[in-house]
Image (cartoon, coloured by chain):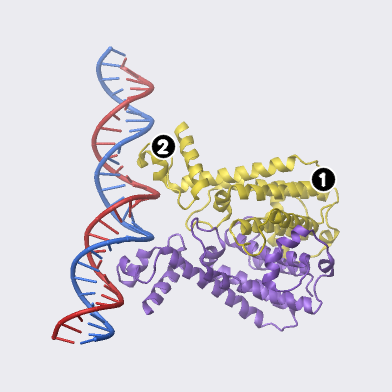
Chain colours: A purple, B yellow, C red, D blue
Amino acid sequence: MEIKGEILAAARRHLASEGAPSLSLRAIARELGMTSSAVYRYVTSRDDLLTWLIVDAYNALGESAEDAESSVAREDLIGRFGATCDAVRRWALANPHEWALIYGSPVPGYVAPADTIGPASRVSLVLGAILVDAVRGDRVSEELKNERVSATLDSSLEPLRQAIASEFPTALIHQALMVWVALYGMVSFELFGQLQNVVGEGPGERDEFFAQCVRQWAKELGIR
Amino acid sequence: MEIKGEILAAARRHLASEGAPSLSLRAIARELGMTSSAVYRYVTSRDDLLTWLIVDAYNALGESAEDAESSVAREDLIGRFGATCDAVRRWALANPHEWALIYGSPVPGYVAPADTIGPASRVSLVLGAILVDAVRGDRVSEELKNERVSATLDSSLEPLRQAIASEFPTALIHQALMVWVALYGMVSFELFGQLQNVVGEGPGERDEFFAQCVRQWAKELGIR
DNA sequence: TATTTTTTAGAGCACTGCTCTTGTATTAGA
DNA sequence: TCTAATACAAGAGCAGTGCTCTAAAAAATA
């Protein structure tokens, strides 16, 4: 299936340069010198092509985060956490359209197939592993470990608890999820232009702003 | 210009039911019983129509937040903060397509006109006013008030500082911005389906999860 | 070589945003 | 009241989209 590979490569190029909304099957066909109908022998629909690109993007982001995290000494929990956050942000800035495809507004009517959930959770697995190490080494916030929460909150976080397969205290799971969401929210805000006229864009300003965020997130989890 | 009003009303209906991507000028024209070309006498382009809807959505969200916040006693800072957060989330859940339009992935090539920035900042003004009251009454985190930060971070937050027109300590401004972004990130995550299989969807579970987030955000700002 | 299978081309349908010219009401002025 | 100016709408048309169908060419197999 080498033709399918070429189609995907062309689609990747179009996605990176023009973005998902203007990704056209006919344009790809033109670029590859074939008819639009011929493409349909390898791609069942436009949504099918988008799914491939989504899986692609999740894997690229996940790999980027894994690489960055693995190059830090295992004992340096804060370093591992910071490297992961930085890798996520850097990948997003380098691949804005890919980021928008996976974390932007969902296309009405499109339902993500099951084979996207694996690649989609790679980054959270990295962050989860850091947290596990922190808990094992007793290097997380004491306050979160002992905070009592309502039964409803307990059950609301049951799905995540089972995914982690650990008996973390609920408050800690909740805080970790908050940090995770905050990271993605911050990156999305920067990427989607929502920080314009809010955070300066001078040399190093956005970097330093984000670095402060990372420090704060680590502090909120009590990682040390 | 009553016809333009009808066009906007029809566009609003289409946006609410099918979402922005499938908002078609021709469909609106059909619904109103006129030709597509006739619509162009009142709307210069599809982007122009989208801009109207964007301003509309910003105003609706802002009004919703203002109404909720203003119905809480002025001294109850945490109550005002919580009411604002809840109003944002409730509005988003009730108007998912409108939320996606203003806080989802930006349409490549579309540039938001200047008349959107006013309505866009209504919610942040509400949150900002709460913070101002908290600072005036000395009811914010002491730690944030005294934390020393780098010069680069100072200058990176200069745009926001000027918008607030207050001499807040940089660490406090930074933390407030983090909370603001976290709020939007959390709402977007819930709305865009990113919390599926992460946070339960049983009766009250999502509500309680979000309420815990709000409590945590207030704690991070030290509002009391 | 003949036959079957795989792949491609081409035409076509229904839809989109948008433009341009022509026609028709409606209004304003003489 | 009749005419001229104006405002508005219709229709055709262009270039593009996703997608489907049938017929033709190419490749693999018997």
Percent across and percent down for residue B189 are 62, 59
Q: Amino acid at mark 1?
A: Asp
Question: Which residue: 42% across, 73% down?
Answer: A8
Q: Earlier in the sequence, mark 1 or mark 2?
A: 2
Question: Which residue: 40% across, 44% down?
Answer: B27
Helix, strand or loop at label 1? It is loop
Mark yes or no: residue B144 visible. Answer: yes
Q: Amino acid at mark 2?
A: Leu
Between the residue at mark 1 and the residue at mark 2, the CA separation in whole angstroms equals: 48 Å
Percent across and percent down for residue B150 are 75, 67
Q: Quadrant of residue D9?
A: top left
Judging depth in this view, the residue of B63 and A123 nearest the camera is A123
Q: Which residue is mark 2?
A: B32
Left or right of B121: which side holds A28? left
Judging depth in this view, the residue of A18 and A167 nearest the camera is A167
Mark 1: give few (<14), some (14-19) or many (20+) Cα within 10 Å. Answer: some
Q: What is the chain identity of the residue bearing mark 1?
A: B
- Tell me whether circle 1 and circle 2 mark residues in contact (CB < 8 Å): no
Left or right of B78: which side holds B28? left
Percent across and percent down for residue B17 are 51, 47
Q: Quadrant of residue A103?
A: bottom right
Mark yes or no: residue B40 visible. Answer: no
Helix, strand or loop at label 2? It is loop
Q: Quadrant of residue A170?
A: bottom right
Question: Which residue: 51% across, 53% down?
Answer: B111
Q: Which mark is residue B76?
A: 1
Percent across and percent down for residue B93 are 62, 50
Q: What is the chain identity of the residue bearing mark 2?
A: B
Q: Which one is in front in this view, the residue at disc 1 or the one at disc 2?
A: 2
A166 up-or-down from B78: above or below = below
Mark 2: give few (<14), some (14-19) or many (20+) Cα within 10 Å. Answer: some
Left or right of D13: which side holds A106? right
